[in-house]
Amino acid sequence: MSWRRIAALLLAALFVGAGVVVALNLRDETQGADSPSADAITTRTPVDLIARGEYLTRAGDCIGCHTVQGGVPYAGGRGIETPFGTVYAPNLTPDPETGLGRWTANDFWRALHNGRSRDGRLLYPVFPYPNYTRVVRADSDAMYAYLRSLPPVAQPNPPHGLGFPFNLQASLAVWRALYFKPGAYRPDSARPRDWNRGAYLVEGLGHCNACHSSRNALGAPAGPLDLAGGLIPVQNWYAPSLTAADESSVVDWDVRDVVALLKTGVSPRGTVMGPMSEVVLNSTQYLSDGDLAAMTTFLKALPVTGSARTAPPPAPAARSESQARGAALYDKHCVGCHGPQGEGIAGAYPALAGSRAVTMASSANLVHVVLQGGFPPTTAGNPRPFGMPPFATVLADVDVADLLTFIRGTWGNRGAPVTALEVSRYRSDVRP
Amino acid sequence: MKSRRLPAWWLAGVLAAALSMPAAPAPVFEDSIAQRVQACTGCHGPQGRAAPDGYYPRIAGKPPIYLYNQLLNFRDGRRRYGLMAGLLIPLNDAYLHEIASHFASLEVAYPPPQATKEGPAVIEQGRLLVTQGDPTRRIPACVQCHGDTMMGVAPSIPGLLGLPRDYLNAQLGAWKTGIRRAQAPDCMRQVANALTPQDIGAVSAWLAAQPASGKPAAALARPLPIDCGGVTHAAGGPAR
């Protein structure tokens, strides 16, 4: 074969490949009539379109990314850091120059459903359209109506901070060809309406798997049904598995406790901290008890998986010295709130004995909580939360490691020891 | 069996011994605002009384709206310190207002100031700037706004005494570089911009060497020399 012929074949293959990528990127670009099954999963309460849109926008936690710290809600500008660079969430207020002022309901639907902007640009999947593609048209229209009702704010969108090749639309087109397919929520007629409503919220607007699943090297989550836990990129908090019995499966929780956790941030079975604190603050506390119960029905029906733990607990001798130092640190810094038996105080300080948050394989959240401290969110149901002080300036890496090794191996807890190296890695996430 | 012959007092004795064994101390718990804000006192000291030998400032007894404004500033990104922002982001205005009012209400004695290491010339330069300002450079005296006793003015102007020198240096420097900001118009930004690094060092050294006592003044003795957003434009209470 001559070089000329090989070159021609390669060129042809390239064209065909590009054609396939383009075709895959333009799938399902109809103007979105609702699927006939939409009635099975949507609710028309509240009746007012704008109020319903506000409710759904809350359910999607749009404000969480589309608001810069201390800025006007929905006016954009927050930089979302990813392993590929920083993507800035744009202005969603109806300003004609910098916001959604010139967008139609069809444009908005295409952004949610197909991940394309008004001008046709492909959108980065930091915007969780792989989830939002399941949102039905009626809900998209309600959210559009709500965003149109906001006061317009002229706030230009900062350019994304992405390096080559992630800054190219062509790269994004390839990513989408591989990992994104427009879809719709398909109700499971064998399941009750409650379960379907919960699945629709968890997989769609709730985009729970954006954090609660692992991502591959190109940042694609394992799938909307995968809620098996994952380390949140850049933030390095571990969003625990919602299926694993030794992480955050709620299969044996009372429905009321799950609803309380999402509504108030606290419950008899656990307390939210870190990124989930912001989710409750901005999103789930505003959801109706009915929708939270529906999400709980879905979460409780997830198949329970076994332990995600990889390292077996080490021989007691290896950790005794570390344990002894940890016990002394516990008596000095922690016992006052968490108690001599790690029992905590109901309604104020979480118990450490028997806590899955303490013993789960990843130590990321424990290290973050000890270093940074934190509050659960203020909510209507918990307006004055109790807080945990940060110890980043008090405890060295080895101190935190010994302390956590002690807590993870005492009062019947059987968690793996924590090394100073792990602490050092997570300490770099704490920014002064 | 032998054990059957043990007298009854034996059992009573064992029970009594078991009951009188010192149980592990239960945590002292009271459902109070002080209990809820232990996240603050971890660094700012018991009751927020941090001494001037560290970096963290005392917060006990500062004017309530000043403290509230600072909590808002940290939460909303006008002041930057990662640990503070991380703690405050999940909290709403109403709770921050309650936290601020709690620390403002605490009357805790001040410890004596740290001995200064600066020479007399620097100290005198600092004293002059604090008490008289520098009209030729349009620098108002600190006492014009912060009160004649420099203990602040209720409800929103903070005192300047009882604070670590490093903290004062860092804050004036941060204002100069724009890292610390306040509600617009940001009067302290204007003042800090007019100060040289030597001025800042002198002012901080003198202030840190003064004994602190008493409470913020009840009201301003005279109008402010410049417009301050944190004093005149800030909301008096929670909005969110």
Image: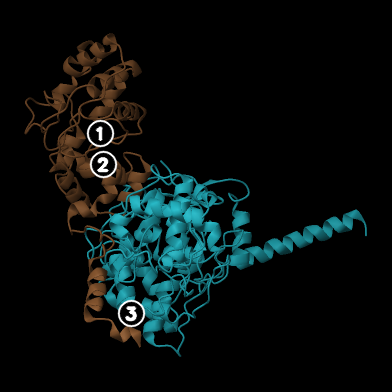
Residue under mark 2: which chain is it in?
Answer: B
Name the disc covering residue A254, or none. Answer: 3
* Closer-to-camera residue (A324/B14): B14
Secondary structure state at the residue bearing disc 2: loop
Q: Residue at x 37, y 48 (%)?
A: A68
Which residue in the rendered view is the most extreme toward the bottom? Answer: A190
Q: Quadrant of the C terminus of chain A?
A: top left
- Of marks 1 and 2, which one's residue comes earlier in the chain? 2
Circles 1 and 2: CB atoms closer than 8 Å? yes
Numbered tag placed on residue B51 in the rendering? 1
- Percent across and percent down for residue B104 are 15, 42
- Do the residues bearing badges 2 and 3 touch, measured as CB atoms within 8 Å? no
Which chain shows up in brown?
B
How far is the residue under mark 2 from the one under mark 3? 40 Å
Q: Could you tell me residue A11's position as x and y percent?
A: 78, 57
Residue that badge 2 annotates: B45
Q: CA distance from mark 3 to mark 1?
A: 48 Å
Residue B22 x, y percent position in the rendering: 26, 62
Q: Colour of chain A?
A: cyan
Left or right of B61 on screen, residue A332: right
Which residue is rendered at x = 45% and y = 80% of the image? A35
Could you tell me which residue is drawn at 10 percent across and 31 percent down?
B214
Chain letter of disc 3? Answer: A
Say what amino acid the circle numbered 1 marks: Ala
